[in-house]
Amino acid sequence: MFGETNTYAHIVAARPNFIKAAPLIEELSNKGYNNIIIHTNQHYDYKMSKIFFQELDIPEPNYHLGIKSGTHAQQTGNSLIEIEKVLLKKQPKALIVYGDVNSTLAGALAAVKLHIPIFHIESGCRSFDKKMPEEINRILIDNISDLLFCTEQSACDNLINEGFNKNKIKLVGNTAIDTLYKVNLNKTINKDYYLCTLHRPFNVDNKDILHKILSKLNKLDKKITIPAHPRLKNNLNHTYNNIEFIEPLGYLDFINYLKCSKGAISDSGGIQCEASFLNVPLLTLRPTTEHLVTLERGNTLVNIDKDFIFQKTQHTDTPFIWDGNTSKRIVNIIESYDTQNS
Ligand code: UD1
Ligand code: UDP
């Protein structure tokens, strides 16, 4: 029988998950709940994983599942098998899953068949591009989740348009922004540069396309710093005199680099939110975004054939309820859900 403990299980797997999970795990723990942290190890390099646990004070995972890299089926299927074993053994009250990576889907699938309630953090995001694996993951996860926590109104609207029960949809804000509120951003970097990250398969997996993008960046009016995601590094076969490639950065250094840059170029989901929150102009090298709110705040969608022109942004307000209290709101909602469903 599930749900008899005061324990919440969390699936974490990849860099953005750690950043979104940290404040919620802390808030649950402050309120006296137990957390079981299940790390599938989809990301496993020190700079892609452990450094975030150290910098953000996330407790050491209770389980490392050792899934690592592979095809979508391998990552999802192997995670599903291993997560099910842990859930059967630990019988948590609910499973909390973050974002849209393959391990998030595996966690939700394992839980739903065991009748464990699923709470989806960053629900309702849609790029409307089913060629993105994340889009498939998000749609499936939302359809089997019991509480759908959204970062912005457009995500709630997507869920309403798809016919979800309104009582499940909760506009709470962004836990990754809670994490941002907690960090000290007083350091300065006295360089004149743009920051860039790229990891989407459609930008980096084809060496010719990647070379075309990097050649264009190489001609911009400032030096470019690229903390290179392993997926980008694996496909790099040229050098560029205006681009400095460095190892992936830990969260604290990365946010500092972002804040001190004159602008950023990226295909990341999370960096769109962080850049718009920090008033850093961003060029997003993607045809669509699942964070519409950022388009009013310095984020511009570009492609390789467009001019790369940064939008000026100097907002004094923050996007609605990106106020550092999202995790508190989530825990309050979870508590009243538990009371109603016990
Ligand atoms: C994954 C997520 C993506 C998310 C991104 C965050 C899926 C389908 N993709 O993409 O949604 O935006 O994480 O960064 O879940 N590698 C290493 N060391 C690591 C991790 C990966 O060398 O620690 C290399 C491996 O060669 C691997 C490749 O990077 O094959 C891609 O890793 P993978 O986790 O499959 O996908 P990401 O591109 O990181
Ligand atoms: N990030 C980081 N170091 C880096 C690049 C990114 O700490 O070198 C952080 C960034 O602040 C953001 C998250 O990683 O919170 C985004 O991860 P990524 O772009 O890999 O994934 P996505 O958000 O696209 O799923």
Image: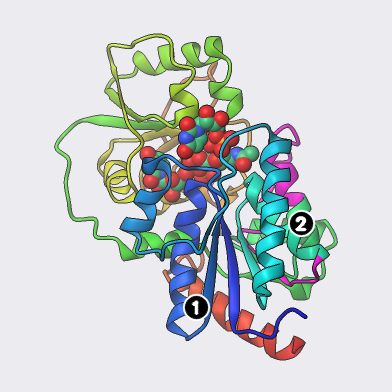
The x and y percentages for residue 159 are 76, 59
- Disc 1 vs disc 2: Cβ atoms closer than 8 Å? no
In the picture, the quarter occupied by the N terminus is bottom right
Alpha-carbon neighbours of circle 2 within 10 Å: few (<14), some, or many (≥20)?
Answer: many
Q: In front: 314, or 227?
A: 227
- Say how the picture is coloured: rainbow
Residue 247 relative to residue 273: left or right: left
User: Residue, x 67% and y 70% (percent of image)?
Assistant: 89
The answer to whether the beta carbon of the residue marked 1 is less than 8 Å from any atom of ligand 2 is no
The x and y percentages for residue 64 are 53, 54
In the figure, 207 relative to 336: above or below?
above
**Three-letter code for the amino acid on which mark 2 is drawn:** Leu
Residue bearing the label numbered 2? 109
Does residue 37 appear in the picture of this structure?
Answer: yes
The x and y percentages for residue 142 are 75, 58
Q: Earlier in the sequence, mark 1 or mark 2?
A: 1
Q: Secondary structure at mark 1?
A: helix
Q: Judge depth for marks 1 and 2 and give the one in front.
A: 2
Residue bearing the label numbered 1? 28
User: Residue, x 29% and y 51% (percent of image)?
Assistant: 252
In the picture, the quarter occupied by the C terminus is bottom right
Is 193 magenta? The answer is: no
User: Residue, x 70% and y 61% (percent of image)?
Assistant: 85
On the image, which quarter does residue 149 sit in? bottom right
**Three-letter code for the amino acid on which mark 1 is drawn:** Leu
Is 116 magenta? The answer is: yes
Any mark on residue 296, and which?
none
In the figure, 32 relative to 151: above or below?
below
Q: Which residues are magenta?
A: 114-139
